[in-house]
Amino acid sequence: MLRIGVPAVASALLITAFNSLDAAWVGHLIGGAGLAAVSTSVFWIWLLVSVAEMVSIGLTAVAARRHGEGDHEAAARATGDAFVLAGLIGLTIAVGGTLLLPRLFAVMETPPDVTALGMQYLGTYLLGAPLIFAFFVVDAAFRAAGNTALPFRMLLLSTAIAALLDPLLIMGIGPIAPLGIRGAAIATLVVRGTLGVVGVWLLVRMRLVRFARPDRRTMATIARIGLPTATTGVVFSLIYVVLTRTTTRFGTPALAALGLGHRVESWMYMVGVGFGAAAAALVGQNLGAGRPDRARRAGWLTLAISGVPGLLGCIALLLVPVPIASLFADDPAVVAEAANYLRIVAVAQLVVSGETVLEGALGGAGYTLPPMITSTAMTALRIPLAGWAASRWGPSGIWWVISLTAIGRAVAMTAIWAGGRWQRAKV
């Protein structure tokens, strides 16, 4: 588990580190409105990523099960089918998202300056949707085969290059014209696009992908398994869009704090994503090999290990919230409200990664519908509770609702894993 999990966690944290650096450059070079624009765009980007995870999670479950059964050729064909499915969905989102761009910000009721910058950032990002989807398929194919070290090395190199490009594209230098906030989005796409192209080449060389006439049944199976988890992410994004409307009435500092806090929390979330990727591969392979006992132990062991970074994250947010917030913004009002957010959600960091670990383990088993229903219901409670709490305690009420519902989701996911019905899922 550690051999697979540590590189997966490192890869997830690299992506988070770059996203955080991207937001920090925007906050310092463009200002509070730019940070708010990136922060509100993130909720729509999360929706895009959630749809990409439908293909990723479905492929992980199918390919890992085939690898566990010893049918590596079938796993390679499933990966080829996943690329076709991802390409079709990615192109659809790129076109549809671009056409709907003004409405995406209108529904959040963001201030005019934030909307103008956000449309530049998100519009650029949406055009790269096919590259984003290709990256997720590459990652899932290696993960299902138990190889997370190679994707990590690829990600490390491309992230270093993109981190240097970020300020250069924003400010411009020499022959490079300043692109402003669009430059930040382009730098992000460089990371995912490079990994997608190089990853396909490596998968072909390692015989982990085979392109043939697409098998509709395999594509349908991938979509069926991944759809519930993707639905959870999509609903999560839409709920945050509604929360953005609730937060907007408290001004740009609260709006920026919501997005900034979400980015900081994503560190613990991505720890869970990394360990969850390892758990998904191990659970899927062991179920395919007829060893549900090893699959069960893999889930519990991964959950226990993920609690260590969760404890460290909780301590950091309690002790140094202001320095952490200051990494992203210079505006004193934004820093103060973001620090308040981080203090309130600190305790939730103990369990955020654990929830994601078990969700990944359940996805590896192909058991995704009950977790989706449970997680979606708990997250949906944020809408009425946040409105009620905000009217009484202002932004702090919203932050408390986010923290307590996150804890509730983690408890519920633990109960689903302990129930054991996932062991009977068919893939």
Image (tube, rainbow, N blue to C red):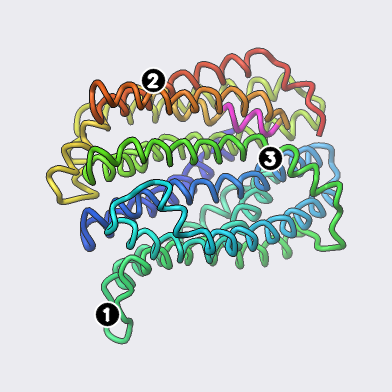
Rounded to the nearest angstrom, the CA distance separating label 3 from label 1 is: 43 Å
Sequence-wise first label, 3 or 2: 3
Q: Looking at the picture, which amino acid does disc 1 mark?
A: Ile
**Secondary structure of the residue carrying numbered label 2:** helix
Which residues lie in the magenta part?
A: 358-364
In the rendered image, the quadrant that contains the C terminus is top right
Badge 3: few (under 14), some or many (20 or more) residues near its Cα, within 10 Å?
Answer: many
Residue 71: quadrant of the picture: top right
Q: Position of residue 314 (x, y in %)?
A: 31, 26
Quick check: 278 left or right of 260?
A: right
Closer mark to the observer between disc 1 and disc 2: 2
Q: Which mark is residue 347?
A: none
The residue identified by callout 2 is: 404
Identified at 67% across, 67% down, the residue is 201
Residue 185 on the magenta span: no
Badge 2: few (under 14), some or many (20 or more) residues near its Cα, within 10 Å?
Answer: some
Residue 359: quadrant of the picture: top right
Question: Can see residue 158?
Answer: no
Q: Is residue 59 above or below residue 95?
A: above
Identified at 33% across, 72% down, the residue is 169
Quick check: 144 left or right of 256?
A: right
The residue identified by callout 3 is: 226
Closer mark to the observer between disc 3 and disc 1: 3
Rounded to the nearest angstrom, the CA distance separating label 1 from label 2 is: 46 Å
Residue 290: quadrant of the picture: top right
Please tell me which residue lies in front, 253 or 105: 105
Sequence-wise first label, 3 or 1: 1
The residue identified by callout 1 is: 173
- CB under 8 Å between callouts 1 and 2? no
Badge 1: few (under 14), some or many (20 or more) residues near its Cα, within 10 Å?
Answer: few
